[in-house]
Amino acid sequence: MIKLSLEEKGSEMVFHMMEVETIDSEMLVRLKTFSESRGGFFRADLKLFSVRKRWTQKTARQVFELLNIPVKFIDISDNEELYEPLHKQRIYFGKEHYGKRWEELPKSYLSWIISKMNEERIYALAYAEIKRRDENDWHIAYNDKNTSENNNISKSNIPKKKVNTYKRQSVEVIGFGKHKGTAWTELPLNYLLWLAGNLPKNHHDMTKIKESINQLK
């Protein structure tokens, strides 16, 4: 049984393969043929393959059944630990940067995505990557300054982290994932951005996720 998760990436559907080492070589060849015959790509080293189709999980399951390819779909909401960090994931759009990791994209391109692209999921990923870099730059600059001044920096000179005091009136809690049972108002921004970038666009909590992100920016 091949364990997969399904993710929409622009005009493609990307299948993430779990436990690739348990899939025999003959089945990998079948998956490669399946993918490439439908305009996609197959990368065993990245543990994924794609098709240029807009399928639901139900449709994908039916296609695999017709081809006698045994698969089991895994819900990403309950298996977050199986996925790479956002900045290690790859983009599947554009000509110049297609297939690159988010961490490899120029900051100018990330800014372009935020200003020009309307897809909320891609916007959230670009925003998360810029924020990650800004935080890393601050830590590097602070450590350099700390070293050069022989650890004599007073606390008053250290930039204070901005604290968002926004409080939502709702006391609803998230019902899945590693923060299951936590109030939506207490979820960290990075986690909300991760959800927006990885859950299906039609997920039942996507509207709530987007609202929470917009309020915390």
Image: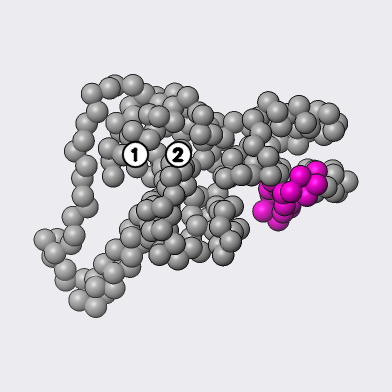
Q: Quadrant of the N terminus?
A: top right
- Point out residue 171 in the picture as x, y percentages from the top left corner: 29, 21
Q: Residue furthest right?
A: 26
Identify whether 109 is placed above or below 115.
below
In the image, 65 versus 150, the foreground residue is: 65
The reply to whether residue 68 is in sight is: yes
Q: Secondary structure at mark 2?
A: helix
Residue at the spot x=85%, y=33% of the render?
Answer: 67
Identify whether 126 is placed above or below 96.
above
On the image, numbered disc 1 is attached to which residue?
A: 213
Q: CA distance from mark 1 to mark 2?
A: 9 Å
Q: Is residue 46 left or right of residue 211?
A: right
Quarter-wise, where is residue 187 in the image?
top left
Magenta residue span? 34-50
Specify whether residue 121 is painted magenta: no
Q: Which mark is residue 196?
A: 2
Which amino acid type is shown beneath numbered disc 2?
A: Ala
Q: Quadrant of the C terminus?
A: top left
